Image: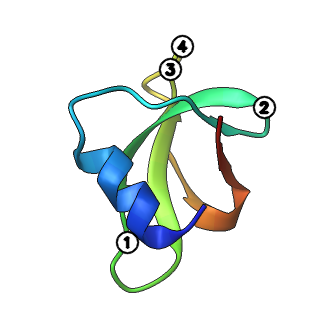
Amino acid sequence: MIKQRAIEISESPIMANVTYNDIPVYIQKVSDQNETARIFPLDDPQDEKEVNLSSLIEH
C-alpha cells in the first residue's frame, strides 16, 4: 500500500477493507519517518503492532 493511501484510510471515519497477512486490520497511524503503520486486528484491538506499508493490502 502506498503511504498516502494509508494516511487517507487512517484519517477517514469510514472503515476500509484492509488486511495484513490475510487478517482484517484497522490502521491507527502512519509513520512520517518511514514506510510503516501502527495497526491492530479488528477482532483483537489489544494486539497492536507496527508493520511495513508494503505488507498491507486494500481490498
Q: Quadrant of residue 23?
A: top right
Residue 54 placement (x, y as % from top left): 68, 65
Question: Which labelled disc corresponds to residue 13?
Answer: none
Residue 43 is labelled as 4
Q: Which residue is mark 1?
A: 31
Task: Find out whether the residues at labels 3 and 2 contact each other: C-beta distance under 8 Å.
Answer: no
Above or below for 47 versus 54: above
Q: Residue 38: tell me if it is visible.
A: yes
- Disc 3 and disc 1: Cα gap in Å? 20 Å
Q: Which residue is mark 2?
A: 22
The C terminus sits in image quarter:
top right
Few, some or many C-alpha atoms within 10 Å of disc 3 (few <14, some 14-19, many ≥20)?
Answer: some
In the image, is residue 32 above or below residue 47?
A: below
Which image quarter is the N terminus in? bottom right
Which residue is the extreme one toward the bottom? 33
Left or right: 16 with respect to 13? right
Where is residue 28 drawn, in percent x and y? 34, 45
| Discs 4, 3 touching: Cβ within 8 Å | yes
Q: Amino acid at mark 2?
A: Asp
Say what amino acid the circle numbered 4 marks.
Asp
Q: CA distance from mark 3 to mark 2?
A: 12 Å
Tell me the element at label 4.
loop
Sequence-wise first label, 1 or 4: 1
Callout 3: helix, strand or loop? Answer: loop
Rendered location of residue 6, percent (x, y):
44, 57
* Residue situated in front as seen by the camera: 37 or 6: 6
